[in-house]
Amino acid sequence: MEITKTDIQALDQYVDGTVCSSTQAPEDRAGAQLLAPHHPAVVLEARCAEDVSRAVAFAADHGMQVAVQATGHGRTRALDGGLLIDTGCMREVRVDAATRRAWVPAGATWQDVIEQAAPHGLAPLSGSLPTVGAVAYTLGGGVGLLARRYGYSADHVTRFEAVTADGKIRQVSPEDEPDLFWALRGGGGNLAVVTGMEIDLMPVAELYGGSLMFDLAKSPEVLTAWTMWTRSVPEAMTSAVVVIPFPDLPMIPADVRGRQVVQLQVSFAGPEEQGRRLVEPLLRAGSQLRNTLRTLPYMQSGAVSDEPDRPAAYRGKSVLVDDLDPRALTALAHRAGTTPGGCTVGVRHLGGALARTPNVPNAVGHRSAQYSVGVLSLLHDGDPSGVSQVQDELLAPFALHRLGLSLNFTFGPLEPDQVRTAFTPADADRLGEITARYDPRGVLYANHPILAPAPPNDSDADLI
């Protein structure tokens, strides 16, 4: 159905937010991901759940699909036509220090939550980059700086406010809409438009962390040292390794310019003295280019990884494995550095609390995974052709221990059977059934949609 100016004006009368036709250049709404920006017919800058409810109902009545964007870090495919709900105005975080909980609206970043929680000596289970949208991150599970001690971000959601494809605002909790509550915590974003979530906060005011940097060419043994080190550290220690190919350009700091750099990222939720003892084996792993380890107030937690916070065009893929061969990791790092434009390798140590099912189970997949192994390609010319194949080839040596994909760290379109590998077959079927129940017409447009299981084939049944 074609959307007219009159239709847009009618929607505008019923919402508090701003409604406009898509006259703005798509790249102006790209967010953090410059690749494949949305091309909507209508945009709503929502201000409340009622805005979202009316917009979804409007889209359903007009045969339109609905995409949602906060910061745009995880966008993998573009909406062509339809309605885009921009939640960037919904950012007012509320903290209840007595219950150690926070209400997090759809557009809030983790930095918004951190700033409200820190004065109370509390911290959310936020990720390595504080400017990522908190809700979208959590819907995909969420592996953060305190993950091995406290688990997935999704494990600590106590309730959602969400708008389903029929435009209804629902309060989603273990008592109300329990299937949807199970699915939203780790199942992705194609089940409902989450307008807010209540989360637990942790009694963490500071952490011991930062990074150690090494030149891979001079200290190739660092990756083996880190892998072996992870097998004995306590749950309070969460760490990752990133191998970054820095270009030989004048604006790059001299100590890393033109090098393939191994960055060991450390986040210890415990006393500094104990943290220092724990990282001593890493200090002996090679000649360091940088050492930023120190006690950090959680307000400065972004300094652990010190990731660049600027828009870029990128594609990435990440797999979950139940074991990690350090030789395969070292080989991956060397091969990644030879790909056109260079490819960044990222490995996260999992296990600990991540392996334990929360009191109220959720859809997070493959809790037995001990590591996630990912590759990320910056597309300087904006052309993603061939990148997926290169990334598959880079990750192929990990097939023996591979459990499935990690959707939160997979930036690119996937086939339905690939999406299903992020979950057990039974959980993937359950997610598909819940999606079909709440969104039978496919109104909601998601990065990695979970499809309903195929009905049994009658001819197959005859053979049983």
Image: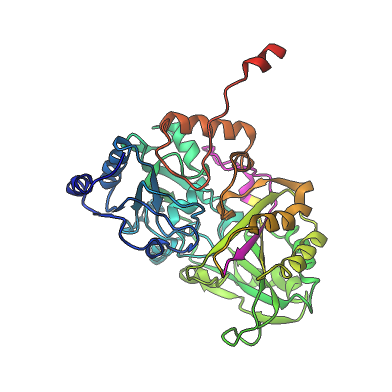
Q: Is residue 32 left or right of residue 279?
A: left
Answer with left or right where residue 200 lies relative to residue 370: left
Q: Residue at the location (77% across, 68% down)? A: 334
Count of marks overlaid on the render: 0
Residue 38 seen in this snapshot: yes
Q: Residue at x 75, y 75 (%)?
A: 216
The foreground one among 259 and 230 is 259
Viewport quadrant of the C terminus: top right
Based on the picture, tell me whether residue 357 belongs to the magenta stretch: yes
Can the viewer see residue 464 in this picture?
A: no
Of the pair 452 and 362, the residue shown nearer to us: 452
The answer to whether residue 101 is magenta is no
Q: Name the foreground residue: 179 vs 284.
A: 179
Viewer-side residue, 152 vs 8: 8
Residue 337 is situated, as x and y percent measured from the top left of the image, at 72, 70
Kindly report the secondary structure that dominates the magenta region of the rendered protein: loop
Query: x%, y% of residue 2?
Result: 30, 42
Q: Residue at x 68, y 76 (%)?
A: 213
Percent of width and height locating residue 66: 38, 44
Location of residue 227 (image quadrant): bottom right
Quarter placement of the N terminus = top left
Q: Quadrant of residue 274?
A: bottom right
Part of the protein shown in magenta: 353-380
The spot of residue 80 in percent (x, y) is: 41, 49
